[in-house]
Image (cartoon, rainbow, N blue to C red):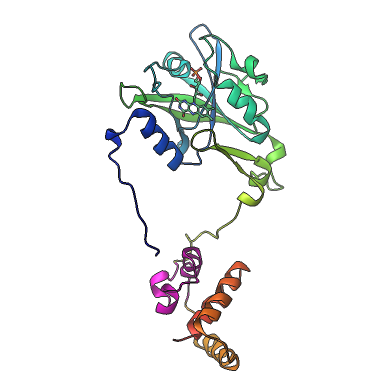
Amino acid sequence: MKERRYITLDPMDLTQRERHGYLLSAVAPRPIAFASTIDKEGRVNLSPFSFFNVFSSNPPIMIFSPARKGTDNTTKDTHHNVLDVPEVVINIVNYPIVEQMSLSSTAYAKGVNEFIKSGLTEIPSDLVAPPRVAESPVAFECKVDDVIALGDQGGAGNLVICRVVKMHIDTSVLDDDKQIDTEKMDLVARMGGMWYTKASGNALFQIPKPLRDKGIGVDALPEHARNSKILTGNDLGRLGNISALPDDNAIRKAKEKLANESNADKALVHLQVHTLLDDGKTDEALTLLFAYSD
Ligand SMILES: Cc1cc2nc3c(=O)[nH]c(=O)nc-3n(C[C@H](O)[C@H](O)[C@H](O)COP(=O)(O)O)c2cc1C
C-alpha cells in the first residue's frame, strides 16, 4: 500500500459548517428521498432529503432525516408534517426530474405546495393521504412508525422511520422479468456541496456477488502477487474472490507456456494478469499467477 498522510479531526472541534461539509462530501453519493407529506389542514408539501436509505426489506423500512437548520436551528415543514400526519410518500429521483427536485428544496413558506412550484404532477396515493409524484420512476407509500430526534442543536437530524405499505413502479423501468432495470432507472445521487452524480452509462459496473462461494482470499495468493507494484487492490480483490485454487494440471500447462516465453519476467506476468482480469478472464489470470515463481 502506498504511504498516506491524513488530517485527523475531532468532529466536535469543528464549526457546524465544516463538520457538515466533511461529513457530506465523504458519505456520498447519497440517494434522494423526494418526500411528499401533508399538514393538519391537508396542505401538500414536497421536499428532497439525501439523509436517506432503505434499512430493512422485511418489514420494508426506509429512513430519512429532515434536520434542524445549521444556521438558525429552525425545523422543517416536512418534520412538522410527519409528526402531525404520520404518512409520507418517498418518491425516487432520477435524472429527468433532478432540476425540478432541486427547485422544490427552496424554503417556501409553510403551506406552499412545491408540486406547483416545481411543475410536477400529483397523483392520489392508494393508502396514505399525501399524493405521489407522477414523474418519479418509483414511489413508496409509507406509514411513519416513529420520529426520533437526534439532538436539539442546529444540524441535528430527525430520523423519520417509514414503513412501506405500497410501491408504484413505472413499467418503463422494468425489464422483461418485471425486475427494475438499473440502466433504465437513470438515478441521480447527492454528493458534497453542489455536486450530484448520475448512476448511468460508464458510471455503472458489475461485480459478481461473493456470497454463494467463499473466495480464497487475498492471503491465499502468492507473495509476489500480494507485493506487486503492478496489480491493483481491485485486481487482488477480484482474484481473492475466486472460490478455488487452480488445479495442478492447469498450473503445469501455464508453466510450460511461460517457459517458452523467454522474456516472461515478473512485471510482464503481472501485466498479463492485469489485462486478463480486465477482459473478465479471472480463472486464467489466477492460474498464470500460480504458474509464475520468483
Ligand atoms: C438533493 C437535496 C438533498 C437534501 N437533503 C436534505 C436532508 O437530508 N436533510 C435536510 O434537512 N435537508 C435536506 N435538503 C434541504 C431541504 O430539501 C430543504 O431544507 C427544504 O426546503 C425542506 O423543505 P420543508 O421545510 O418544506 O420540509 C436537501 C436539499 C436537496 C436539494
Q: Can you give x and y, in whole percent of width and height, for residue 218 in the image?
A: 42, 70
Q: Is 9 situated left or right of 180 in this image? A: left
Would you say residue 58 is visible in this rendering? no
Q: State the residue in front, 95 or 216.
A: 95
Residue in view at x 46 percent, y 28 percent: 162
The quarter of the displayed image where residue 184 is located: top right
Most foreground residue, 41 or 259 = 259
- Would residue 98 be visible to someone looking at this image? yes
Q: Work out whether 231 lies above or below 193.
A: below
Task: Tell me residue 2's x, y (percent).
Answer: 40, 63
Q: Quadrant of the C terminus?
A: bottom left
What span is colored magenta in the figure?
215-244
Up/down of 69 relative to 279, above or below: above
| Residue 229 among those drawn in magenta | yes
Residue 227: % across, % down: 41, 74
Q: Left or right: where does residue 136 sit relative to residue 105?
A: right
Quadrant occupied by the N terminus: bottom left
Residue situated in front as seen by the camera: 239 or 171: 239
